[in-house]
């Protein structure tokens, strides 16, 4: 009080009502990675009220998906959560497979598990790295990006692209692992573990880092559930809901792993949960490699395995035993003569309509593959799932990533809806920010791991 | 150590060249300015979408655009020379991007990073701007969805060439 | 798996319009006026305990010439019982309004704004019914089937 009186400040001035100041943050703020706008009302440095405005990256995923065939939706799904595109891919394909009532082969499911987990690790690496960088820990960011690069190299080796991979096919995956992939993947994991150890030493018990995160951005478990939050965010509040455990899909029920759970639901817990999840993901990858067996990676529309040799031209393989009986004749309807004779030549081949795109070697290598591909890609010719609706959730990088597919019986989806895991978290953001300081916005927002592509779709 | 004959000859050549003798070399100020500018690109990464992941990869240690003097992103448009538009621009974002461009001081350059910013990419729909050059002038287009880091570096070198030869003005007609 | 359809049908025989189960997803189609009653029941009934409104969206059946035109779709999940239920409400184009669930689950707030933005279905009692993904000047509702997917609207200037 004595200092104040020197400055000629009376008690009245101290108690006087202050007027809030409105500050805009985003949509092109460096810490608002992705694009989101926060309109904050401040009292001094404390946040009174936050308005979150989203939609700056609305790219009409759901509308585009209605225009394309079932297979053409896959590239759009890559760009939803672009930090873990493989999980989106698999989630969408699994939803359509569920609608069609088919199940992929065991090897394919193992591949999906492994690739999903690689994606999850790279997702969490980016999240932890970026949020650490925004708090000033640039070294940690560089280290983690280095680790992510190892994983991108693995992804590139399998899928042919680093980021937007379009690896999945409905009823399987595009290609099997290349030769020697297992060894390289395990090596990469070893490297990532090394980096994580270093980062752990740099960040986890770092005084500045802890002070910035501990007790900031608190949310209780009840609030989180009421807001529909899932994923690492919900787990940091103490709820152990993980779709891989709660309703195991693919082969997750055969793999042993733990679900890390926090206790307080603050930024520091979320950081720790993400760190531990990376470790568990790597454990899953190792286990999955150990359990994986050789086999086919694709099934047809009836859910039967397609052996790799089936797509090869049978005549070229010397399988010409029925040909000599049939006189080729000119057909006035230009329907082709071979069509009605086909059954007689190959009585054991069923007249089946395939859903899977043929392997790329066949598409480029022989006419049958090319025709098959062309037929499936053309609108109006591809296989159509039955009428109905289906919802299939998978555990994405940020939480439950659900695809709700409505089919009207044609070869284009009538409606594809994504349940974006970021969306509920962002809607709860005002709750976490109000009462904190302006500087805490960065820490809390970093721990949300907002991905604009999936938030705005 | 005894010098060989060719070595001695070389030393003589250097001594007789005007390298060590007082003299001058002729150049234009604009060239010097261009040379200086191309190696100190201060960029403003306006990261909106997926391409941001590749932008991160380029900026970090594996691909390291610091080698080209562009390693230091400025997060204020007023302090930067090059606007990297990284990722899809939607109709809602377009006015924001235009304002950021207008806030940058001359000389300024714009790089369209990724096919969405070049042409709209495969987002041909109601929400997406079909190429940012419908709104602001673009100097270098880096296509790809997203472009590989090597492509980005290639684009950056192209931009450097352009900066080197553009003299005082980035956009002479303006 | 408990038969959730049966539970709801027995409890509210007048409010359930139809129900079906496909691929293990149980769906109950409710009458519009019964939405709040049933939702309150499924949220608080201990044997159901749907504490999470996982997803809320809509489907436009204009292209199939169906009347009523819209379906508002709710996906519910219970973290304690680990079961899911889909609840649908049919909305006609003339009376494009459903009761808001914001007082039951806060997550409904943004989801309902999104449905309003994309489909033009209004929610009665929503505290902040405005566009969320598109900008205010945008005319029409893009996810309706009669909105052409590439119908662009003129760009608007900087807004503050």
Image (cartoon, coloured by chain):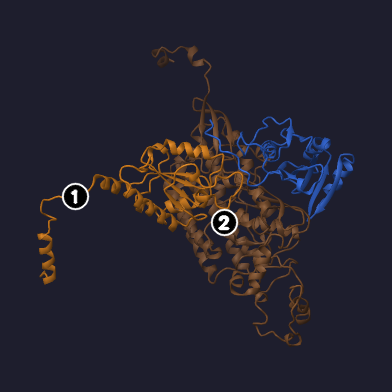
Marks 1 and 2 in Cβ contact (< 8 Å): no
Q: Is residue B99 left or right of residue A87?
A: left
Q: Residue furthest front?
A: A332
Name the element at disc 2.
helix
* Rendered location of residue A252, percent (x, y): 66, 59
Q: Does mark 2 fall on the same chain as mark 1?
A: no
Q: Which residue is mark 2?
A: A119
Q: Position of residue A279 (x, y in %)?
A: 55, 55
- In the drawing, does residue B117 fall left or right of residue A344? left
Q: What residue is shown with label 1?
A: B26
Q: Quadrant of residue B29?
A: top left
- The chain carrying label 2 is A
Could you tell me how far apart the alpha carbons at marks 1 and 2 are, in whole angstroms? 56 Å
Quarter where residue A436 is shown: top right
> Mark 1 or mark 2: which is in front?
1
Q: Where is residue A387 drawn, in percent x and y?
A: 78, 55
Q: Nearer the viewer, residue A366 or A289?
A: A366
Q: Residues within 10 Å of mark 1 (few under 14, many from 20)?
A: few
The chain holding disc 1 is B
Q: Is residue A248 visible?
A: no
Q: Is residue A308 left or right of residue C84?
A: left
x, y percent for residue C21:
82, 52
Chain letter for the brown colouring in the rendering: A
Q: Which colour represents chain B?
A: orange
SS category of the residue bearing label 1: loop
- Give the drawing colour for chain C: blue
Work out whether A258 lies above or below A440: below
Q: Which mark is residue C152?
A: none
């Amino acid at each position: 009080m004595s200092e104040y009186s020197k400055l000629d400040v009376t008690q009245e001035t101290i108690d006087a009502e202050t007027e809030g100041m409105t500050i805009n943050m985003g949509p092109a703020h460096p810490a608002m990675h992705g694009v989101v706008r926060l309109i904050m009302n401040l009292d001094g440095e404390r946040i009174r009220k936050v308005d979150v405005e989203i939609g700056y990256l609305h790219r009409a995923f759901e509308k585009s998906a209605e225009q394309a065939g079932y297979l053409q939706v896959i590239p759009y799904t890559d760009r939803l959560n672009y930090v873990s595109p493989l999980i989106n891919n698999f989630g969408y394909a699994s939803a359509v497979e569920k609608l069609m009532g088919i199940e992929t082969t065991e090897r394919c499911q193992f591949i999906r598990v492994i690739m999903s987990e690689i994606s999850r690790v790279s997702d969490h690496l980016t999240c932890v790295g970026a949020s650490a960088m925004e708090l000033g820990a640039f070294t940690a960011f560089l280290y983690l990006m280095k680790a992510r690069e190892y994983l991108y190299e693995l992804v590139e080796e399998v899928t042919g692209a680093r980021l937007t991979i379009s690896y999945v096919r409905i009823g399987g995956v595009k290609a099997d692992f290349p030769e020697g992939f297992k060894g390289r993947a395990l090596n990469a994991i070893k490297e990532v573990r090394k980096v994580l150890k270093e980062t752990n030493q740099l960040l986890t018990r770092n005084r500045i880092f802890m002070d910035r995160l501990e007790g900031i951005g608190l949310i209780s478990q009840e609030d989180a559930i009421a807001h529909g939050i899932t994923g690492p965010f919900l787990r940091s509040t103490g709820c152990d809901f993980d779709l891989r455990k709660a309703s195991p899909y693919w082969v997750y029920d055969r793999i042993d792993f733990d679900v890390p759970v926090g206790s307080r639901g603050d930024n520091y817990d979320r950081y720790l949960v993400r760190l531990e999840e990376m470790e568990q993901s790597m454990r899953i990858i190792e286990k999955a490699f150990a359990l994986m067996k050789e086999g086919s990676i694709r099934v047809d529309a009836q859910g039967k395995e397609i052996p790799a040799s089936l797509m090869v031209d049978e005549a070229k393989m010397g399988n010409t035993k029925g040909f000599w009986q049939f006189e080729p004749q000119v057909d006035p309807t230009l329907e082709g003569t071979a069509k009605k004779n086909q059954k007689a030549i190959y009585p054991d081949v069923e007249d089946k309509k395939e859903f899977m795109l043929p392997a790329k070697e066949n598409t480029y290598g022989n006419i049958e593959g090319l025709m098959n591909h062309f037929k499936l890609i053309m609108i109006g010719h591809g296989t159509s799932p039955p009428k109905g609706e289906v919802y299939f959730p998978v555990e994405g990088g940020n939480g439950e990533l659900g695809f709700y597919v409505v089919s009207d019986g044609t070869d284009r989806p009538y409606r594809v809806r994504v349940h974006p895991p970021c969306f509920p978290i962002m809607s709860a953001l005002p709750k976490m920010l109000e009462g904190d300081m302006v500087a805490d916005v960065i820490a809390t927002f970093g721990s949300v791991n907002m991905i604009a592509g999936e938030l705005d779709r | 150590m005894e010098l060989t004959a060719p070595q001695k000859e070389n030393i003589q050549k250097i001594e007789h060249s005007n390298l060590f003798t007082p003299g001058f070399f002729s150049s234009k100020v604009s060239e010097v300015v261009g040379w200086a500018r191309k190696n100190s690109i201060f960029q403003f990464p306006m990261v909106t979408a997926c391409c941001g992941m590749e932008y991160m990869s380029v900026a970090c240690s594996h691909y390291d655009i610091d080698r080209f003097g562009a390693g230091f992103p400025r997060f204020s448009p007023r302090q930067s020379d090059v606007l990297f538009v990284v990722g899809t621009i939607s109709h809602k974002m377009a006015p924001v991007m235009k304002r950021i461009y207008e806030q940058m001081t001359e000389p300024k350059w714009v790089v369209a990073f990724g096919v969405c910013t070049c042409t709209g990419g495969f987002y041909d729909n109601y929400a997406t701007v079909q190429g940012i050059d419908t709104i602001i002038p673009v100097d270098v287009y880096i296509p790809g969805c997203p472009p590989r880091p090597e492509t980005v570096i290639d684009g950056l070198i192209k931009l450097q060439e352009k900066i080197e030869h553009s003299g005082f003005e980035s956009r002479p007609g303006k | 798996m408990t038969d959730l359809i049966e539970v709801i049908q027995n409890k509210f025989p007048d409010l359930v319009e139809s129900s079906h189960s496909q691929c293990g997803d149980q769906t109950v189609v409710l009458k519009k006026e019964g939405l709040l009653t049933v939702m309150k029941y499924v949220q608080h009934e201990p044997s159901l305990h749907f504490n999470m409104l996982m997803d809320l969206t809509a489907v436009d059946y204009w292209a199939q010439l169906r009347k009523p035109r819209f379906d508002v779709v709710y996906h519910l999940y219970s973290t304690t019982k680990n079961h899911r239920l889909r609840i649908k409400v049919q909305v006609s184009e003339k009376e494009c309004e459903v009761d808001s669930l914001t007082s039951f689950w806060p997550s409904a707030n943004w989801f309902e704004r999104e449905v309003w933005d994309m489909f033009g279905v209004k929610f009665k009692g929503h505290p902040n019914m405005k566009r969320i993904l598109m900008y205010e000047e945008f005319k029409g509702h893009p996810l309706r089937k009669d909105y052409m997917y590439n119908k662009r609207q003129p760009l608007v200037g900087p807004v503050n």
